[in-house]
Image (spheres, rainbow, N blue to C red):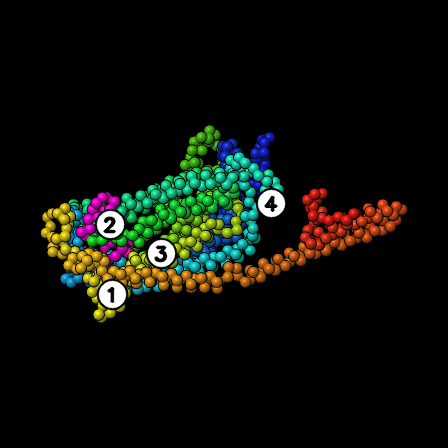
Amino acid sequence: MVMQVLIRTPFDESDRSGIRRLMNDGTYLGVFPLHEGRYDRPHSSGISLDRRVLYQTWAHPSQWYKKQPLCLVRKYFGDKIALYFCWLGFYTEMLVYPSVVGTLCFIYGLATLESEDNTPSKEICNEYGTGNITLCPLCDKACSYQRLSESCLFSRLTYLFDNPSTVFFAIFMSFWATTFLELWKRKQSVLVWEWDLHNVDMDEENRPEFETNATTFRMNPVTREKEPYMSTWNRSIRFVITGSAVLFMISVVLSAVLGTILYRITLVSVIYGGGGFFVKEHAKLFTSVTAALINLVVIMLLTRIYHRMAIRLTNLENPRTHTEYEDSYTFKIFFFEFMNFYSSLIYIAFFKGRFFDYPGDDQARKSEFFRLKNDICDPAGCLSELCIQLAIIMVGKQCWNNFMEYLFPKFWNWWRQRKHKQATKDESHLHMAWEQDYHMQDPGRLALFDEYLEMILQYGFVTLFVAAFPLAPLFALLNNVAEIRLDAYKMVTQARRPLAERVEDIGAWYGILRIITYTAVVSNAFVIAYTSDFIPRMVYKFVYSETHTLAGYIEHSLSIFNTSDYKEEWGASVSERDPDTCQYRGYRNGPKDYEPYGLSPHYWHVFAARLAFVVVFEHVVFVITGIMQFIIPDVPSEVKTQMQREQLLAKEAKYQHGIKRAQGDSQDIMSLFRDTSQRTSIAGSQVTARGSWARRFSRLSDGLDAHVEVAARPRRSVESTVWEVS
């Protein structure tokens, strides 16, 4: 109530009003509600204040296993923050199920590491059998020929995540994501009813910044009042400018991914050209890990730059309400962060090695750009590299964010208090409560944005590429258990108390969650079909293998290249003698076939099987999830019954009010007739009585129809809908 008074109070002779305009002008430095006492010790009066209770029962790390006191959080911080913590707690609880299933899939991979299901890995690791196959060099002159057995570590690592349970887990995660969204809609509907949050966004007012920058006005068609307005042409120009800036930043992200690819290609040449024995032995693993770490650093730097840029772009758009401002800012940030965090994963999963033809391809050596075709996967597949990339980015991001959320506010508050004490001349001056709160971190009006964004990106890691890293839900669960208490600790102890706000839902984030869920179905289908070796193995097992086993699969998946087809400047290092043939990963014809190095029939069989799997997987999952959405109602039947009961009681109350009003008006009509009968002028009294009676009767009908106080309605001679008899 106090904030509403401050927002509406004029501060000069013009129409300008509101504390936020004065904040923008720099007249005031801050406006915020005060915390209730201290959190670290009880009040001197002995009363347990809400802040102290929240710290003891919610924000303290020792309370990590207890349920959140959402009613007290709502009372102290408001509906918006309480709804966020309710969503975060619900999401964390739902993560228990995929964490258990994903861990079981990983344990299955460990338990069956030496079984028949892992026959391809055994063949790669057999140095005296298939593992003795000579592989073509990865680069010209600097690299040397390798033995297939050198990929033994990658093949065993790949099997931990690419085993028969992977397909089941991918299907399970698709159903889990749909169930999570539907159950959250049900829970949110209960909260909206219990907390009385229906239609709270309809009462939202214009942003002061919008009213200040708007140069045109129009008549509001609903309120019939003059209001600031921004023309469609003006908005279009602003959208074009901000959209161009966003696309430019997306191109910067893609350039960073391209730079990481070139780094991997170059580093392999450097290692094989002059690295030590240990580094050469683990060159692929070393390259993958360092490239992922560099990519993580670039991601975090670009995130810091773009967040500041996005605020300026949203201010340039100048949305009308704060909800529109948040939605615009949300979509800008998420679109950028999606490309920033997932572009390298998308490249490894769906594009790496797809452009490689064969070792003697001269197209790949024409320019530095075409060198990207030589960025190929290990003979064991790309899934192990995708797993490493996903684990480093996801876990590294979580550790960095938790570190910043805990230590940065502490350091910031300590530095501000230190500067204030140095500027205070009277050392005996006791700092008031408002001074202590002023030195805390200002959460701003977008206080929950970073928290939501962090969780939404994590949801993307958990669902989009979960087939490559089944332990992702487990790491997300462990992080979220700490995240709830860290966010609570920050809000209770390190940040100013935010202004309580009422919201009807989690806003644009729910739409983003639904988009990610649908995208995850397609993504996991393509990861299983094109990134993992599940489909090629099944095709070999049931079509090409005489024993219907995976024995001989590795040798069947490699193609032969005649080293005599190398040009003089190509091939391995000068000091190494070329063998007659070498092999490479791919389904291509041999050097003596009708179409040398062309695509073999096996390639088209695998391609057709992959395409069929994607189509069947998507249709089955979408049909079943659609049935689940239809079966699970958005609003529980108990809540729907209570809402209908409330509407009925409201109608009855309005009807009773209208009846009482009608009875009062009928008594007035009877007294009117008695008065008119006593009048001497018959003609004049008839006209007066009829006109007055008609007006009374019209008010009576209004009261019965609308069930509201008709006396409060303004009546106009021209626009009034009340009829009158004369």
| Disc on res. 523 | 3
| Disc on res. 709 | none
* Residue 5 appears in view: no
- Where does label 2 land, which residue? 373
Q: In this orientation, which residue lies closer to the viewer: 255 or 48?
A: 255
Instruction: Please name the amino acid that badge 4 sits on.
Output: Val
Q: Earlier in the sequence, mark 4 or mark 2?
A: 4
- Where does label 4 land, which residue? 222
Q: Earlier in the sequence, mark 1 or mark 4?
A: 4
Q: Earlier in the sequence, mark 3 or mark 2?
A: 2
Residue at (39, 64) in percent of width and height: 620
> Which numbered mark, 3 or 2, is in the foreground of this view?
2
Picture quadrant where residue 562 is located: bottom left
346 part of magenta stretch: no
Residue at (44, 46) in percent of width and height: 330
- Where does label 1 land, which residue? 540
Residue 596 lies left or right of residue 215; in this view the side is left
Mark 1–mark 2 Cα distance, whole angstroms, equals 26 Å
Label pair 1/4, CB-CB below 8 angstroms: no
Label pair 4/2, CB-CB below 8 angstroms: no
Mark 4–mark 2 Cα distance, whole angstroms, equals 61 Å
| Residue 538 % position (x, y) | 28, 65
Dot 3: element:
helix
Q: Earlier in the sequence, mark 1 or mark 2?
A: 2
Mark 3–mark 1 Cα distance, whole angstroms, equals 24 Å
Residue 573 lies left or right of residue 40; in this view the side is left
Look at the image and give the residue range highlighted in magenta.
359-386
Q: Quadrant of the N terminus?
A: top right
